[in-house]
Image: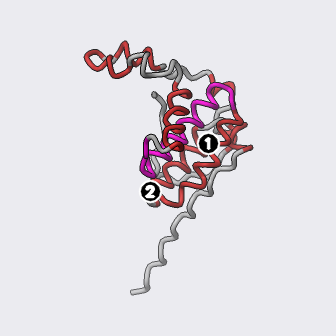
Amino acid sequence: MERDLPDAHRARPLRPDKQPTLAQFRAQKPLDPAAVSKLAGPLADAFDATHWPARWVQVAQARLADHQAGRRRYPGLQHCSLLFEHAWYAAHAGDLKAAEQSLDLLREALPQLVPSDRAYFTESWNDTLPAELVLEAKPPRRPAARKKPAPRPA
């Protein structure tokens, strides 16, 4: 699951011209589970194809279905990460509707996270997802930059 995510502590204005287009986004080549298995050396069994779907979007989908059905319970941050991963990989596969649905669920779940984690997802949503998806699934607003108090006269 290789991708560059921004530093959550950098406040940058939304710059749609800097977001990748869907074509640029889909041109990225993340490793699939089979490739990870080949690189995992002695841990390769953990990525055995009998336990892992062929594509990451399917892995995230299966984990989210287990969570929803109560077969597994993921705490807030892990659940939000799964939602974002599903959105990312669904968009990468060209399924923007599925990506939007996961982002809608993520938006509902974000308030339960601490501010730094909310900022991480907001930055990732704004800066790493394709512009076409961000236009449809509006990201949460970035927190306003704190103003430094004026220095007191001596």
Outermost residue to the bottom: 154
Q: Position of residue 138 (x, y in %)?
A: 69, 49
Identity of the residue drawn at 43% across and 86% down = 153
Q: Quadrant of residue 38?
A: top left
Q: Quadrant of residue 142?
A: bottom right
Q: Quadrant of the C terminus?
A: bottom left
Amino acid type, label 2: Ser
Q: Which residue is mark 1?
A: 102
Identity of the residue drawn at 61% across and 21% down = 27
Identity of the residue drawn at 56% across and 61% down = 143
Amino acid type, label 1: Ser
- Other-residue count near label 1 (Cα within 10 Å), few / some / many at <14 / 14–19 / ≥20: many
Part of the protein shown in magenta:
72-95
CA distance separating discs 2 and 1: 20 Å
Q: Which residue is mark 2?
A: 116
In this rendering, is residue 28 above or below 14? above
Q: Is residue 100 left or right of residue 32?
A: right
In this rendering, is residue 72 above or below 107? above
Q: Position of residue 33 (x, y in %)?
A: 45, 20
**Per the image, is 89 magenta?**
yes
